[in-house]
Image: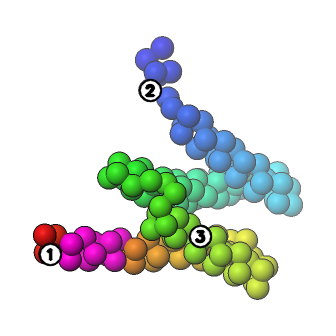
Amino acid sequence: MALRDRLRPWHALLLAVFAVGTAVALLRAESITTRSVLRAVLSALFGLIVFQFTVGSVWSYAVEYHNTGGSWTDVPFVTPFAVACLAGVVVGIRSGSAGLAAWTGFWAFVVVAAVVAVGAWVAAGYRQAEA
C-alpha cells in the first residue's frame, strides 16, 4: 500500500513511454537477440530521458506561469507554444524528419520563452520604476 500511495499518473506515463520505446526498437530490429533487446532497452531509456526532460520542462513552465497569477490563455504564455509548433511543422515538412522537427520545436520553445520572460521582466521593472 505504501508504494501504491507514492506512485502517480506521471510514473504510469513514463512506464508507457519506456514500453513503447522498447517495443518500437524491437520491431525495427532485424532479429530478436540478447544484443537487440539490450539495444532496445537502452534506446528506450534514452528516449525516456529526452521525454522527461522535454515534457517536464514544458510542464514546469506552465505551472510556474499559472502559479504567478498568469492565465494559460495569455498571449505571453501561448506565444512560445505557437512559435514552437510552427517551427516544428515547417522543419518537419521541409526535412521530412520527425526527430528534427521535435528538436527544432523544443529549442524554439526554449528561446522564445526566454525572450518573453526577459521582456516581461524588463517591462515589470520599468513599471516599478515609474510607481
Q: Residue furthest top?
A: 1
Whole-percent x and y of residue 88?
66, 75
Q: Quadrant of residue 62?
A: bottom left
Q: Alpha-carbon neighbours of circle 3 within 10 Å: few (<14), some, or many (≥20)?
A: some
Label located before the other in sequence (3 or 1): 3
Q: Is residue 6 left or right of residue 55?
A: left
Q: Secondary structure at mark 1?
A: helix
Query: Is 9 rendered above or below residue 54?
Result: above
Q: Quadrant of residue 105?
A: bottom right
Q: Amino acid at mark 3?
A: Ala
Q: CA distance from mark 2 to mark 3?
A: 35 Å
Measured in 3D between alpha carbons, the distance from the residue under mark 3 to the one under mark 1, in whole angstroms, is 32 Å
Q: Secondary structure at mark 3?
A: helix
Q: Position of 25 compared to 110: left or right? A: right
Please state which of the two labelled residues, at mark 2 or mark 1, is closer to the viewer: 1
Query: In the picture, residue 30 is in which quadrant?
Result: bottom right
Q: Which residues are magenta?
A: 117-127
Q: Residue at x 26, y 77 (%)?
A: 122
Disc 2 designates what residue? 6
Marker disc for residue 82:
3
Taking the spot 47% from the left edge, 76% from the top edge, the residue there is 112
Instruction: Tell me, yes or no, whether the two marked residues, 2 and 1, touch with CB atoms within 8 Å.
Output: no
Q: Quadrant of the C terminus?
A: bottom left
Of residues 56 and 39, the one nearer the viewer is: 56
Disc tally is 3
- Dot 2 lies on which element? helix
Residue 44: x and y, percent? 64, 54
- Magenta stretch, main secondary structure, is helix
Location of mark 1 (residue): 130
